[in-house]
Amino acid sequence: MHAYARSNTGAVGHAPALAKRFSEAGLAPADLAGQSDLDRLPVLKKERLLELQAADPPFAGFLSCDLSELSHIFVSPGPIFEPAHVDDATGHGMDVIFESAGIGRGDIALNTWSYHLVPAGLLFEQGLRAVGATVVPAGTGNTELQAELLLKLRPIAFLGSTVHFAKLVEILQASGQNLPADWNLKHAFLGGEFGDWTAQRRDIEQRFALKTWSCYGTADLGLVGHEKHDSFGYFLHPDRYVEICDSLTGLPLPLGASGEIIVTTLSRRWPMIRFGFGTGDVARALELADDGGAERISNLEAGSARR
């Protein structure tokens, strides 16, 4: 928690909306000596950030660096604006996912997430490039061509939604391809679906002899948590302080209790402090760190948004 205070003292001085949040709670960044101090700050819900940005575009006073330091401004549905700093070479921490999976130099990845306005395509690409992989920036559309690329370019990894993956499989099988013998896929980094997604993943792994991967992240925060081989749940990015909290009081819940995911970033330039999701993302803390924050959380529970 002291590291968080050091990293964000300058941020408060440059971001008036952040300074206002501290002032209204009677706090200064240097006061954050422990979890109980941080929890004096009310949770900032995503829908509230959207309202604030609508009233004071583009960043509502939360950006703590100059606009000239940004490489991109992403526009997610809402609209809500998310900045990307010019120095970010990891895609908001997305490189950790691929390191964990063993993706590296010489590996080809077909990235079918959108590169248009929203951050998914570019952030995943930056994460892949950070570990040395070669990216095919497919984006959305051109489904028939994407199916062909799985055969001709022989990528080791696919990135995209589970539904889109199933569509490409359908196209290839309809054309007489013998899968998995006719492709080189070993990994599928998939966006989740509602329903029994775990069963869907196991089915994909068994039918196509590959490993599926999931992560938990957002445009506002980047990567929050990622999977590791043969371990349950999401291991949290070291630059994210995560609490599982009561959705009404905003206070942390005991180990194992289901609650809302509340995230604090260690980014000086876009410091999201005690940030919660209007989508109602619900999980359980499976391990706690010495500072009181979660170290590992469960996969998102039924009814939550999946990423």
Image: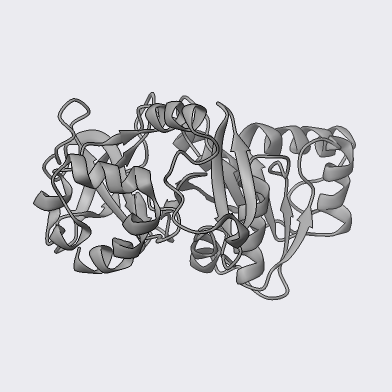
Residue at (12%, 62%) from the top-left corner?
Answer: 33
Tally the numbered discs: 0
Res. 84 image quadrant: bottom right
Q: Give left or right: position of 16 versus 255.
A: right
Residue 184 can be seen, yes or no:
yes
Residue 61 is situated, as x and y percent measured from the top left of the image, at 43, 43
Nearest the eye: 25 or 243: 25
Question: Within the image, what quadrant is residue 135 found in?
Answer: bottom right
Q: Identify the residue at image location x=83%, y=44%.
A: 146
Residue 173 in picture, x, y percent from top left = 81, 37
Quadrant of the drawing holding the N terminus: bottom left
Residue 79 placement: quadrant: top right
The answer to whether residue 246 is above or below residue 8 is: above
Front one among 288 and 230: 288
Residue 259 point in image, percent of width and height: 23, 33
User: Looking at the picture, how far across and down is residue 295, in whole percent?
Assistant: 26, 57
Residue 231 seen in the figure: no
Say if 257 sits above or below 108 in the image: above
Whether residue 100 sits left or right of residue 245 in the image: it is: right
